[in-house]
Amino acid sequence: MRVGIVGLGLMGGALARALKALVPAPHIVGVESRAEARAAAAGVVDEVHAELAALAPCELVVLCALIGAIEALLGPVSRVLADGALITDVGGVKVSVLRAARAVRKGVSFVGAHPMFGGEKGGFERVVRFSGVVAVCEDGADEASIARVCALFESLGGRVVRCTAEAHDAAVARVSHLPYVTAHALIETAEGDPLAAALAGPGFADATRLAGFDFGVQGEVARRNEHLPAAIDALIENLTRLRAALATDEAAHALRRRR
């Protein structure tokens, strides 16, 4: 089997290594525009190219690029593949990707997916295991194609959760994109206070870790999520409620230990 990986950064590198650990391992065709990333991937993938045309023999292609590139690549990638080929992705928002997938040509299938792991520090050389949760979207594709994508991620150790693109975006708005925005808000709240900076410990570092993402990696994803404004509104409501509870006997209950 020939598998194409477009984008040889953190997720593309992790996917390539996970695929190579399979027995038998597929033949991996990597496509990456950056020369330094192609050089880093040369010892892991079987072929590495700069042009999409190299994907032509692939039965399955995984788009591991930034979200804007994923949306732009769907049509062009589908046009170099043979009938019966399948495209999936690892993008962190799914409704906008599904809209872009209308450009996928007839004869080629697309199934949206989102591995819920990675990190704010990118790079092909970093190791991320595919043993976490992977969302696979059921809308916009036939059952056989959905099953193929589920089987791919399960073979790598992922725990697949099937859902619609809309439900996915509503959920990750609360547990991924909202924490990212909140991390920025916490930093901005503490900025300008030298004593706060001197006293900040591991708790503050943990709470603000997600602000370490480059905007192109997480910010572009978050701003595409139409459910994020509602999640921000819900957080504001909860903060307002908690602020009121601090002045009452309800404080102990409102701020009870939850984990």
Image (cartoon, grey):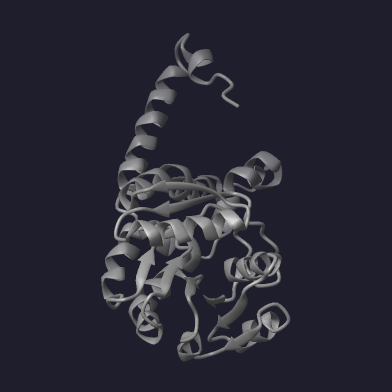
Quadrant hosting residue 110: bottom left
Residue 116 in view in this figure: yes
Q: Quadrant of the C terminus?
A: top right
Residue 201 in view in this figure: no
| Residue 45 horizontal/vertical position (percent) | 66, 79
| Residue 177 horizontal/vertical position (percent) | 44, 50
Q: Residue furthest top?
A: 249
The front one of 14 and 55 is 55
Say whether residue 96 is left or right of residue 12.
left
The front one of 251 and 44 is 44
> Which residue lies at the image location 62% right of the left edge and 56% below the top edge?
130
> Which residue lies at the image location 63% right of the left edge and 53% below the top edge?
157
Quadrant hosting residue 30: bottom right
> Which residue lies at the image location 48% right of the left edge and 74% below the top edge?
61
Up/down of 248 relative to 57, above or below: above
Up/down of 79 relative to 119, above or below: below
